[in-house]
Image (cartoon, rainbow, N blue to C red):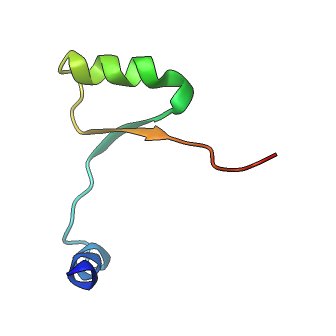
């Protein structure tokens, strides 16, 4: 099933509707958009997995 899902993705048959990507530090802003019904798509929180 996973292969089928990725096949749809590669064929551009899956649409991504990302409104905005927020860094984790702006979690409150992102949550506010969702809670107030102002998100017109996905609100994504980005993490920084790089180690210094």
State the quadrant of the C terminus. top right
x%, y% of residue 28? 42, 17
Extreme residue in the right direction: 52
- Image quadrant holding the N terminus, namely bottom left
Quick one: 17 or 47, which is closer to the camera?
A: 47
Residue 33 lies, with reference to residue 3, above or below; the image says: above
Which residue appears at 25% of the width and 72% of the height?
A: 12
Occupied quadrant, residue 6? bottom left
Q: Is residue 20 left or right of residue 4?
A: right
- Residue for point 27% across, 55% down: 16
Residue 11: x and y in percent read 26, 79
On screen, residue 48 above or below 40: below
Q: Which quadrant of the structure image shows residue 4?
A: bottom left
The relative height of residue 24 versus residue 13 in the rendered view (above or below) is above
Q: Position of residue 34 (x, y in %)?
A: 25, 24
Residue shown at 21% from the left, 15% from the top: 36
Q: Position of residue 51 (x, y in %)?
A: 76, 48
User: In the rendered picture of this protein, how many numbered marks are placed on residues?
Assistant: 0
């Amino acid at each position: 099933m996973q292969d089928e899902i990725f096949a749809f993705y590669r064929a551009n048959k899956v649409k991504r509707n990302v409104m905005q990507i927020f860094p984790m530090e702006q979690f409150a802003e992102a949550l506010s958009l969702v809670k107030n019904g102002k998100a017109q798509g996905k609100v994504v929180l980005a993490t920084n997995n790089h180690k210094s």
